[in-house]
Every structure is written in structure tokens, then in C-alpha cells.
Amino acid sequence: MNLEVLAAFLEAANKATYANRTMPKAPSSRPKSLDYHFEQDGLIYHDTYFGVRDFIGAEIVYENGMPTWGMNYFGFVLDDQVSEKDVYAFLRAALMQPYNDIIPVRGPRRFDEAGRQYRFGVEGDLTNFSGTEEALFDGKVVYRCLVHGGLIK
């Protein structure tokens, strides 16, 4: 798979699915799953996750009907005093930001808005990577998501 094509496709898919509040969910692919589906230029993206406040899931990209790239993730709210609605509204805002400074698997390295901060650190490239995403409210980490993935051969 061409990595430049994959990067552009992932950016489009990420901004057209979970991060975009207007995008409807796809039909559930497994019992109790929440799913998003996106297609563009012959590529297919499917995201399946479970849970709300704390969640686990996977994203897969298909090329010519074959799974060619994937990412697993586990996210959780760390502060019981913080509403997941507030955390995930801020997270969606961060994920809609441009992120040409990092591989396009979540959001930018950093995004700040009204005393809230988004941070994403990742090691590797689209072929093989792992990373940590965090949201801080007034300097306190209230959310964390662990990600890893790469090309499927």
C-alpha cells in the first residue's frame, strides 16, 4: 500500500467518522459494537469499538477487499469527577484539527482550547507504530488512550 495514499485516506476517514458529530454510525458489526464506515477512492475504512466512558476498538483499512492496515486502541477517563460528554466533545474538537506534524492516526501533537489541552505522542510510522493520546483539563490528565498498529501483510 502506498503510504502517502494511506495517510491522506486516514485523515479523510478520521475527520468523516468519529470526530465528525454529524456522521451517522454504521450498522453494528458485532453484538453491542459501535461502528463507523467510510469509503473513498477504492479504499474502505471500518472502525468498531465497545464501551462509552472506557472503550476498546479497532480500525481497519481495506484495499481491493483485503485488510491492509489496522490500529487497536483502548481509551479511558481517569477522573470520576469529569463527564465523558465533556471529555469526548473536547476530543472530537482536537481530532478535527490539522495534523501534518504527526502520522494521521488520531490528532495533532498538541491542541489547546479554553484551559484544555490535547496531546498525542507516537513512535514509528504508518507501517508500525504505538502511541498515547491524552486530554488535560486545567493541567490534570483526565483521559488517556493507548494505540498501536501498522500494515497488515
Image: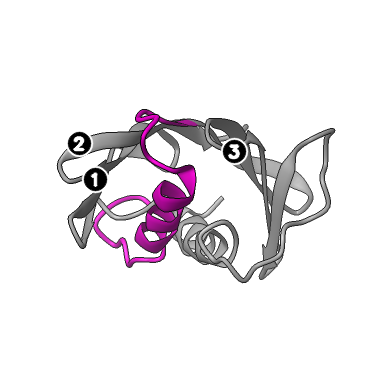
- Give the labeled residue for mark 2: 140
What is the secondary structure assignment of the residue under circle 2?
Answer: strand
Q: Please name whichever residue, 67 or 96, is drawn nearer the observer in this view of the structure.
A: 96
Percent x, y for residue 61?
Answer: 64, 48
Colour mapping: one colour
Above or below, 9 against 141 in this view is below
Place residue 57 in its image quadrant. Answer: top right
Identity of the amino acid at label 1? Phe
Depth order, front residue of 58/34: 34
- Crowding around mark 3 (Cα neighbors within 10 Å: few <14, some 14 to 19, many 20+) is some
Residue indicated by mark 3: 52
Q: Are marks 1 and 3 in contact (CB under 8 Å)?
A: no
- At 15% from the left and 41% from the top, the residue drawn is 139
Looking at the rendered structure, the secondary structure element under dot 1 is strand
Dot 3 lies on which element? loop
Q: Quadrant of residue 4?
A: bottom left
Q: Which mark is residue 137?
A: 1
Identified at 56% across, 50% down, the residue is 1
Mark 3–mark 2 Cα distance, whole angstroms, equals 21 Å
User: Dot 1: within a 10 Å radius of its alpha carbon, few (fewer than 14), some, or many (20 or more) residues?
Assistant: some
Q: Position of residue 9 (x, y in %)?
A: 54, 62
Residue 97: in magenta span: yes
